[in-house]
Structures are given as C-alpha cells and as structure tokens.
Amino acid sequence: SPGENSKGITTTCCYCGVGCGIEVAKDKLGRVIVKGNENHSVNKGMLCSKGMNLHYTVNDTSDRLLYPEMRYARNQPRRRVSWDAALERTAAVFKTFIEKYGPDSVAFYASGQCLTEEYYVVNKLIKGFIGSNNIDTNSRLCMSSAVVGYKMSLGEDSVPVSYDDLEIADVIFVAGANPAWCHPILWRRVEAAREKNPQLKIIVSDPRKTQTCSAANVHLQLNPGTDITLHHAIGRALIENGDINSDFVKQHTEGFEKYRDIVFERTVAEAAAICGVEEALIWEAASYIGNARGFITMWTMGLNQSVVGVNKNLSLINLNLITGHIGKPGSGPLSLTGQPNAMGGREVGGLSNLLPAHRDLTNEQHRAEVEAFWGVPKGRIPAKPGLTATEMFEALEDGRLKAIWILCTNPLISLPDVRRAEAALKKAKFVVVQEVSNKPETLQYADVIFPAAAWTEKEGTMTNAERRVSYLNKITAAPGEALPDAEIICRFAQKMGFAGFDYSNAAEIFAEHAALTRGTNIDMSALNYSILKEKLTVQWPYTDVHAKAQNDDEASLGTKRLFADRQFYTTSKKAIIHSFEDVNKSEALSADFPLILTTGRIRDQWHTMSKTGKVNKLKQHISAAFLEIHPDDALQRGIRENALVVIKSRRGEVQVKAKLSGDIKKGVVFLPMHWGKVLNSDLNRANNVTNNLLDPKSKEPDFKFTAVEVSPF
Ligand code: SF4
C-alpha cells in the first residue's frame, strides 16, 4: 500500500462489476502502488486479491503493444506504421466495403471493460454515421438475459436496489452465482451484515457447493437447467403458505393469475425431484422468504448464460413481485455484473439492439430523437437490430460480414464453440484489433493493430451493478504510442470524414452522453466530471434536483432505490409477472455425451487472464485449468485425482487434469473459462467444447449446459 506520505489519486477497479474505489500512488522508484479507497461507498477501503494486485499489471509493461501495425496481405508480416497511415488505410477499407456491400458489411465487437465514453463514441459512429447497428460487446455473453428480464418485468433495464440494501435485508437468495469468489468485496459486505445480524438468512442455488455456500442457511444443489422449476416451486410454496403480498400483487402487478396456474401444475415434491434437491429445503427457503421484511434476489451467470436465460431471470424476479419485495429498503432484484462497465455500455446503447439512454431501437420516435441529437439525417439508424456477438462470427463465416473491429476483448477464448469462431475470423476480409496486450489470440488474424491505453492511462467513467457512476483518473502515461480507445475511434471517424467526433477530452464526450439522457428514466443530465471528482460516485438518475441537494442530503448522491412510488416503467405502470412453459432447451445428453459441463470462474483470475495472468501472486491460488468431477463419476471412468483427462463434446475437446470433488453434483463437471493457449496448445480452452445455442430473446449463449463425456487421457 502507499507509503505514509504518498497521496493517492482516486480511480475505480477495472475488474468486476462491484466497482471498488482505489487510490493509486507512486513509490520512491516511481512504481505504481494501490490501496482501497476508504472514502468510497462501495468498498470502504477493502480490495479483493485481484484489486490489491492491480499495480503489477500497471508496472509490468513487457506485454504492451506500443505502435500501430499493419499488413496488406495475410501472408505478409505486419509492420510498424504511423497512426495516420493505419487509420487512413482502415478508413479506406471500411469505405470500400460500405460502398460495395452496404453498412452492414462492417461491425464492431467491443467489451464491458470499455469506459462509458468509449462505448458512446463507437455506438455513435456505427449507428449514427455508418448507418448500421452492428455493434455488440462481450456483455452479450454475460448480462443480456438480465437486460431483457428487467425490460419485460419492470419495463426497463434498471437495477432497483443499492448495495446498501444487502445490509438491511433479512433474506438474500443467491441464484446461480458465486459472489464469494467472483464479487468478493460485495460478498464481504454480506458476511459483515451477517456478523451484525445473525438472523440474516442466505439461500444459495448452485449445482456446485461453492465458497458462497459456506454462508448459506439453505443450499439448493439443483441439477443444471432446472432453475425455473425451482423458482416456480418456491413461488407455489409461498402461495400455499399465504406468504404473498396480495395488495401489492393486485395494485402494482399484472399476470398473477396465469402465473399461479402455471406454478400449481407441479407439486413442490415433483419439482424437488426434477431439481434433484430435497423437498424440505424448498419449503425452508420459501418460509424464510415468506417471513422476510427485506428480501433480495441476487444472480449472475448461472441464470444469464442459458438457452432459457431470460425466463430464468423472470422466474426469479417473480419472487420479488409476488411478495412485494421491490422498491423498499432491503428488497429487490440485484443482477451482478461480471464486467466493470457492462451497465455503462447499456446506458449509451452499446449493444446491437439498443439505443442511448435505454431508448428503444424499434421505436421510430426514439430513433428520430437520437438522429436529431447527433445531427444525422432522419432514417440513418436502421430499425433492424444488428448482429449480436455470436452472430457476427457466423456472418464472417458465411461472408455477409467483411470487416470486424475487435476492441478490448478476446473472443478467441470467450466465445462459445470457439474453434468455429476462430475459423470464421480466418475467413474475414479485414480484421482490426484494438488492444492493450500483445498476447490475445485474435492478434494473429489482425490486418491492423491499434495499441490502446490501459487502466490508469486514460480518464473516463464506469457504472457498476448498482447504477453507480464512478470516475477513473488518468494517472500514468501510456507506453509507446498507445492511445485511449475513445481517441482511436474519434480519429478513425474523422478519417472517415464524419463530423461530430472532434472532442477535446473525455469530459466533453461524457457531457454529450449525459445530455442525451435528459428526460429519460436514466436521466443523468446534471452530472459532469467536476461533480464526480468531488463526490467520487453517484447513482443515476441524477438530475438537477440531485445536483441542487445539500451535501448532507442523501439525494445529493443520486437515486439510491428505484420504484419507491410503485410506478414501474411499463405502459400500465405495473410490473409484469410473466408465465411461460418450463422446458429445458439445452443440448440433449446421450449415451456418448452423458455428463453436463458447466463453465465458470475461479477466485483469482479474471476473464481471459490478459491482466490477472501477468500476476504471479494470483497464480498461487490455482495455477492451471482443471476439470472438477464427482468422485463417483471419476471412479466409473477410471479417473484418478490429478490425472490428465479428455473432455469431449460434439464440437471439440479439452485436456486438463482432474480434480475430484464431492462438492459438485453427480453427473455434472466444471471447467474454468479463463485459459486460452498454453505453450501453443489450445487444449486448456473450455470453449472448445461449448455450444452455440442461444436464448431466443437475449441471444446469450448456453455456457452452463454442454453435453460431454470425460475419459482418462
Ligand atoms: Fe475489483 Fe471486483 Fe475485487 Fe472490487 S471486488 S477489488 S471491483 S475485482
């Protein structure tokens, strides 16, 4: 941590969506040092293992891309070129494709790590100026089911609660998440709340007994893919026990009768058998929820990354709605975000089916508002959604898409059925990679490489999982000729001949984004960098009312909780209780592929390891990819602890060492998703075997359910 006299500059952690505040200082040798910001409302000085080792990623620049590179043919080596040369050629190639094949022949694939300002300019460029909606991000792989779930049930993609609500809840239901490892500081706050209030009940549903389960009163160790059955069974038990809030349901929701009919189609005992959990545990969970004064549902990839991800979200949010636990202290749904700025990206409309400030792409008036604001001709923004993450790679494969610009993400580890994505990228006519590190697998396919500035080397903002906007300072100089991502995009837009990208700094981009939110449900038009620097963070909506509030007034920090007035963002102002058939649409198991593979994260690595993989300390926890398998499944296959095993699916294979554990459900195996190529072998890569099935509404892949077989090597 910084020495006594060093004064830290404040910023925000660039890893997970918890959004911890960090102070960055320099030691006597000029090396960056970090510590948790004690004045930050999210973490109050705490940092997890990833956050507290961030300085290693800043001080080690050995893997950094320093200069633009370019090549004219794939069989040629790339050569260092000037920024002007690289941008001019890229603009010329994009113009040629757009003229010849139309605007939809190009696409941008971005990231939930992008700062809001970066997202904003990429989205403005492609939608408003190029005239295509072909922008998607890796948030599609992470949060898109929650986005649709919120829109369908509450009328808009809006997380109603604050983290502070976790500290006043009586019951927290963690569904398909392991926050003890993946959102550690938030979980530390839950543990501290439990220490203060031993009556706080924690329910966890997960096919694996994770670290989070050690705090659980009830662990519902369900079969993968049975979440909706479980949520419906809890709903039925709540109704049977008379523990729903009838007044709230009657006055503020729609759809309850149909929901009741559907959840009563199956008894709790029948549901328990399908889920593979004890019936008594479902009743116990329901009785905790039924007696709660404050009830929070909390979830992440276990629900989102599913072929029925939206319905899983809706079935969980229904539990808040039927009990009236929303819009009041200690109550509501809280989707956890994997990436630091997935929410900021959604605010600016940075997905292929969104518009800025949660406007609706299919709404003609909304498109016209954005077009007028950007000063582009009416009708420029197409009504048809663009290609989503996996669809972009399918379009590269079949030739519809000619050029792809990949920024701030490594799809050749993170996409499902990744070998197919790799083959598609090989076929692309033109690939631009905008990157910090020289490691990602995508670089070998790049025709142009743009070196990007990293964390601490640029300023901007991010929004965490509780609608909290935080400012990130520029603290260190970028190495070589690396530039901030927003500046790269703006320089390119100018080379394309587009007006409206001549910002002199990130503050101007933020001001434009904030102005575009005026009058919407995420109104932050009164927010600017000066306020963020003074207050560190605020939660949207943040309007003139908040800006004028006295500093000791809670309103001065924005909006802590949504829907306190029970007015939802739907047309009827009522929340919608959705009902749907409960069918598992995942890949079928068979005699050849009888096990269910679920992929996920480990405590000390983050995403595709381009940053955490540089930190030796973080490898001490778990140093290599592994397969977690139940001892009975291992015995049946002659697999011993630490032996090399082959995991095969209908698409490919992975080879890693086995870790036998009674903590995973029989019939289920687990692979971490972080590893890509190790010593030139891609056999550690979990996504060699995963499948391309998508939720039909959110287009989020089914990472949590792949049919596989495992055998000794
Ligand atoms: Fe960073 Fe998330 Fe850890 Fe906080 S919990 S320090 S945001 S990785």
Image (tube, rainbow, N blue to C red):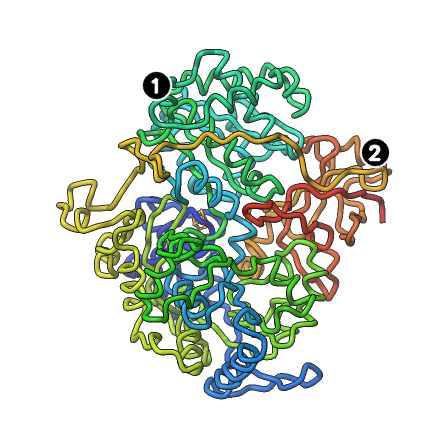
Comes first in the chain, label 2 or label 1: 1
**Residue drawn at point x = 43 percent, y = 55 percent:** 361
Q: Is residue 355 above or below residue 498?
A: above
| Front-lying residue, 293 or 571 | 571
Q: In this view of the protein, which residue sits in the foreground, 308 or 289?
A: 308
Q: Amino acid at mark 2?
A: Leu
The residue under label 1 is 247
Q: Is residue 377 above or below residue 576?
A: below
Q: Quadrant of residue 190?
A: top left
**Dividing the image into 4 quarters, which one contains the N terminus?**
bottom left
Q: Where is residue 165 shown, x and y percent of the image?
A: 34, 33
Q: Position of residue 187 (x, y in %)?
A: 45, 37
Relative to 312, does residue 606 appear above or below in the rendering? below
Marks 2 and 1, how far apart at CA: 54 Å
**Which residue is rendered at x = 75% and y = 44% of the image?**
658
Element type at mark 2: helix
Residue 557 sits above or below residue 286 on the image:
below
Where's residue 149, x and y in %? Answer: 48, 40
Q: Residue at x 41, y 68 (%)?
A: 128
The residue identified by callout 2 is 635
Secondary structure beneath disc 1? helix
Left or right of residue 459, residue 695 in this image: right
- Is the distance from the Cβ of mark 2 to the nearest ligand 1 atom less than 8 Å? no
Neighbours of disc 2 within 10 Å: few (<14), some (14-19), many (20+) = few
Q: State the residue lying farthest toward the top.
A: 241
Q: 102 or 464: which is nearer to us?
A: 102
Q: List x then y, in percent, for residue 559.
A: 27, 42
User: In the image, which disc is placed on residue 26?
Assistant: none
